[in-house]
Amino acid sequence: MLFRSRSGLILKKMGMTRIFDDTGNSFPVTVLKLEENQVVKVLDRNKNGYFALQVGTGKVKTKNIGKAIRGHFAKSNVEPKKILKEFRVDEDMLVEEGKIFSINHFSVGQKIDVSGVSHGKGFSGGMKRHNFAGLEATHGVSISHRSHGSTGNSQDPGRVWKGKKMAGQYGNVNKTIQNLTVLEINDVDDLLYVKGSVPGPKNGYLTVRDAIKSTLPEGALKPAGLKDNEKSETNTSNQKEIIQDEDANIKSENDEVKDEQSNDQKVTEKTITSVDESSNTEMTDTDKNTNNKEV
């Protein structure tokens, strides 16, 4: 069985738009939003027979879920989720329970596979469902212009073969679009811009995984792109900035103290010199008076 080495994500389809590159070329894109994707359970080969991650997303009221699934979330100390998906992974790609995925789990230019439930179109005819040509417009054809025509042979086999393409339910099935390209990532709003269309309606949930027919980019985050890692990196950078600011403040304070000390020394030297000058002037005055008296 083929499976990706890393876990996938559950993204919400917001709609379609277009973006332009530097040369002005227009590309149709589908906008996918990452709501909080959290690891609900880690499956181990010893207990479950294979390695996998159970990922949940979407908010749901506790009163609207059964006691069994409520206990499942409580065991992992995770809030109840609306959608649960299981992703087969390698042993070294396992992530701890409770960890939250980041949109930077994927990278720009990466190939991905998107899976979801297609639009349900109800009971459709052969022309719409299987792209049949239909019957002729004239030459004896009346009323049945859009019918699919004959469905079987003669007395042998005397029945319609199973799987014959006919009118019936169209859409509302699982579809996977492979090798779609990630054109842009907005890590502020947790948005993923994917080139082309994907199955499903707006506000529908899709499963996005690394493309199975393409190699993983060299800069891909392993075992996964997690928000905790980003927070720790930002915290360490903030701590470094704080330490640098504190060092700068201490240096500035030391410089100010040195300046004040030098100013104090200058003031004391000035006062000493002024006192010496005044004492000298007084001594000269007394000497003059004594000389006058002797005369």
Image (cartoon, grey):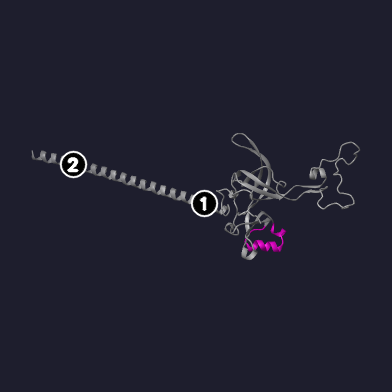
Horizontal and vertical percent for residue 199? 71, 47
Horizontal and vertical percent for residue 185? 60, 44
- Above or below, comparing residue 86 to residue 241 in the picture: below
Q: Is 229 situated left or right of 132 in this image?
A: left
- Residue nearer the viewer, 108 or 90: 90
Q: Nearer the viewer, mark 1 or mark 2?
A: 1
Q: Quadrant of residue 283?
A: top left
Quadrant into which the C terminus falls: top left
Q: List the residue tagged with mark 1.
A: 233
Horizontal and vertical percent for residue 241? 46, 48
- Residue nearer the viewer, 38 or 113: 113
Dot 1 alpha-carbon crowd within 10 angstroms: few under 14, some 14 to 19, many 20 or more: few
Magenta stretch?
61-80
- Residue nearer the viewer, 108 or 130: 130
Q: List the residue tagged with mark 2.
A: 280
- Give yes or no for contact between labels 1 and 2 (Cβ–Cβ under 8 Å): no
Q: Residue at x 57, y 58 (%)?
A: 92
Residue at the limit of the structure toward the top, as seen here: 24
Q: Going from the N terminus, do you reach mark 1 or mark 2 first?
A: 1
Mark sitting on residue 55 = none
Q: Residue at x 67, y 48 (%)?
A: 114
Q: Which amino acid lies under the numbered mark 2 shown in the image of this protein?
A: Asn
Q: Which amino acid lies under the numbered mark 1 shown in the image of this protein?
A: Glu
Q: Is residue 79 magenta?
A: yes
Dot 2 alpha-carbon crowd within 10 angstroms: few under 14, some 14 to 19, many 20 or more: few
Secondary structure beneath label 1: helix
Q: Is 252 situated left or right of 220 in this image?
A: left
Residue at the limit of the structure toward the left, as seen here: 295
